[in-house]
Amino acid sequence: MQIKPNTTTTAAFAAIIAAFMAQPALAQDIGEAEVGPPVIDMDDTVFSGDFISIGAGVAISPSYTGSDDYVFNVLPIVQGSLGGVDINPRAGGITLDFIPDAAEGVAFDLGVAARLRSDRAQQIKDEVVKNYGELDRAIEVGPSAGVKFPQVLNPYDSLSISTAVMWDVKGAHDGMVVSPSITYFTPLSRAMIASLSVSAEWANEDFQDYYFGVDDADYIGPGIAPLAEFEPDGGGFTKAGVNLLLGYDLDGDVTNGGFGIIVVGGYSRVLGDAAKTPFTTVRGSKDQFLGAVGVGYTF
């Protein structure tokens, strides 16, 4: 199953926690490599047919893209495979993959992605930024595709490359967003895994104007001087970052389902107009950090 990491700070945790819960490759204990890996009958695992993983986590991340104030979020997770369709959480939403993975060799994904974007729609901590008003939530929908290469550095790892192209269908920013990512996954033992994801976000001019433009006409707060006006140059990259996950199955064997715990740390850097806007340069920071812990259950 393709790992689809997320592309924003808070919701990146949602995609990564599911990557841990749905990795049957952990059944092969790398500690036994010296005498040869055990033969695993995948028909006897929880992943052999339809399965569902549910979970919840708590993440701390910036109040908005470019903010230096941090807020907590509780994140519900649903992930699995039903009737040959893979269900994967992504940043603020979900991805459906309609191409079943091959038993061996390179695997391909092709499906539909959707997400709810709530940037600057809630939890704005900065009083000056808050005086520019809350933005509308956007609903982004579009195609997703990916490819996964197994056995890159050892018999149990994989390298995944994926992207999604989505458009706002709700009429908030009315723009387009492209979210490419690369993920390297490897088991560290029968129960413990590590996953390293590098991702970026590109957005068109409509998106940039909506989230990063500064206009005096939008300022509604008395008593505090407004920021300098700012007009974005056009489309471009808004951020790039890296997330590291460590996961542990509580009974020592992920193939039988049950509970697992996850710890995630991440860093991203806002780019282009997202870095130039006074919302970042005056009131926030180009450096963005993420921390998260969670628990999941697979059945």
Image (spheres, rainbow, N blue to C red):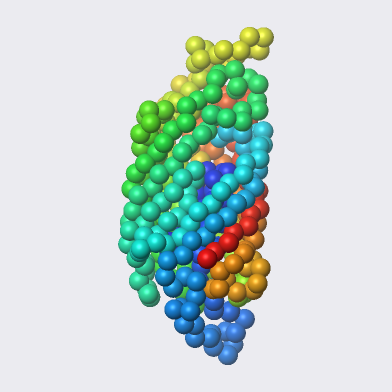
Placement of the N terminus among the 4 image quadrants = bottom left
Residue drawn at x 42%, y 66% as measured from the top left: 50
Q: Is residue 288 above or below residue 205?
A: below
Taking depth in this image into account, of 107 and 116 the one nearest to the observer is: 116
Q: In this view, does 246 lie above or below 268?
A: below
Q: Is residue 213 left or right of residue 259?
A: left
| Rendered location of residue 280, percent (x, y) | 59, 29
Give the residue furthest to the top: 222
Decide if residue 11 is in sight here: yes
Q: In this view, does 30 lie above or below 6?
A: below
Residue drawn at x 51%, y 20% as measured from the top left: 214
Question: Looking at the rendering, which quadrant does residue 268 occupy?
Answer: top right
Taking depth in this image into account, of 272 and 214 the one nearest to the observer is: 214
Residue drawn at x 59%, y 67% as measured from the top left: 258
| Rendered location of residue 217, percent (x, y) | 49, 11
Question: Looking at the rendering, which quadrant does residue 48 occupy?
Answer: bottom left
| Rendered location of residue 185, percent (x, y) | 52, 65
Q: In this view, does 267 lie above or below 2?
A: above
Decide if residue 184 is in sight here: no
Question: Looking at the rendering, which quadrant does residue 165 occupy?
Answer: top left
Residue drawn at x 57%, y 30% as measured from the top left: 122
